Amino acid sequence: MAPIMWTEILTAIALVLVLEGLLPFLSPNSFRQAMHLLLSRSDNTMRIAGLSSMIVGVLLLTIVR
């Protein structure tokens, strides 16, 4: 892979980490409640949520790129 591709991949991972860290940093109690709610969902619901997230991400990448 070209060096520029690694830069883009690492940039994307860094942005994911920053975004994932926002809620626990800004509102730990809300984050904790969200995690408890998430843990109570069925496997099928989690799979649907994960698939939906991936589809939205691919669509967004397609639009941006």
Image (cartoon, helix red, strand yellow):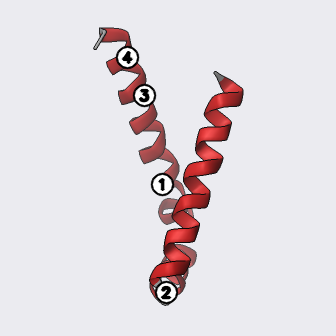
- Residue 63 percent location from the top left of the image: 71, 29
Asked if marks 3 and 4 touch (Cβ < 8 Å), the reply is no
Amino acid type shown at disc 4: Met
Asked if marks 2 and 4 touch (Cβ < 8 Å), the reply is no
Relative horizontal placement of residue 55, taking residue 42 as reference (left or right): right
Q: Which residue is mark 2?
A: 42
Relative horizontal placement of residue 45, taking residue 9 as reference (left or right): right
Depth check: give the residue in front, 10 or 30: 10
Mark 4 nearby-residue class (10 Å; few <14, some 14–19, many ≥20): few
Residue at (31%, 9%) from the top-left corner?
2
Spatial CA span between label 1 and label 2: 22 Å
* Camera-nearest label, 4 or 1: 4
Mark 1 nearby-residue class (10 Å; few <14, some 14–19, many ≥20): few
Circle nearer the N terminus (3, 1): 3
Mark 3 nearby-residue class (10 Å; few <14, some 14–19, many ≥20): few
Q: Quadrant of residue 12?
A: top left
Amino acid type shown at disc 1: Glu
62 shown above or below 17: above
Amino acid type shown at disc 3: Thr
